[in-house]
Image (tube, helix red, strand yellow):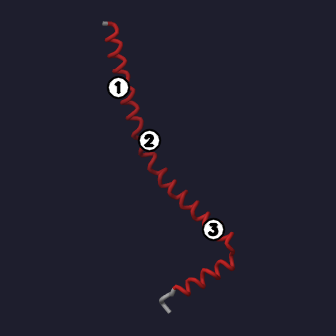
Amino acid sequence: MGNIGIWQLVVIVVIVVLLFGRGKISGLMGDVAQGIKSFKKGLADEDEPAQKAEEPKNIEQKVQASASEETTQTSEKSD
């Protein structure tokens, strides 16, 4: 009784399809897929704040680098 054979699974699937119909089962699978997508998005959103915290440092470095380039270009033009 502990082992479920392939024929028992087939009978169970047929009974479920007859009871609920293909439309409801498809809708249920769509809801499950949407739940998985939102879960993955939630995990990705948790990673974003750590990345955003690093971005201002990079922006400051870029601003300082561009400012030093402008200073260099300005001093070259005046010579």
For numbered disc 1, what is the local secondary structure? Answer: helix
Residue at disc 3, secondary structure:
helix
Residue at the disc numbered 3 = 28
| Residue 52 disc label | 2
Q: Nearer the viewer, residue 57 or 13?
A: 13
Q: Residue at x 51, y 54 (%)?
A: 42
Q: Quadrant of residue 74?
A: top left
Residues at discs 1 and 3 in contact (Cβ within 8 Å): no
Cα separation between marks 3 and 2 = 36 Å
Crowding at mark 1 (Cα within 10 Å: few <14, some 14-19, many 20+)? few
In front of the other: label 2 or label 1? 1
Give the alpha-carbon distance from disc 1 to disc 3, as whole Å.
54 Å
Q: Nearer the viewer, mark 1 or mark 3?
A: 3
Residues at marks 2 and 1 touching, judged by CB atoms closer than 8 Å = no
Image location of residue 6, percent across then percent down: 52, 85
Q: Label 2 vs label 1: CA separation?
A: 20 Å
Which of labels 3 and 2 is toward the front? 3
**Residue at 31% across / 11% down in the picture?**
76
Label 1 vs 3, first from the N-terminus: 3
What x and y, as percent, mark residue 46?
47, 51
- Would you name the residue on which mark 1 appears? 65
Residue type at tag 1 = Ala
Question: Which callout, 3 or 2, points at the residue further toward the start of the chain?
Answer: 3
Tally the numbered discs. 3
Label 3, residues with CA under 10 Å away: few <14, some 14-19, many ≥20: few
Percent across and percent down for residue 35 are: 57, 61
Q: Quadrant of residue 21?
A: bottom right
Q: Residue at x 52, y 58 (%)?
A: 39
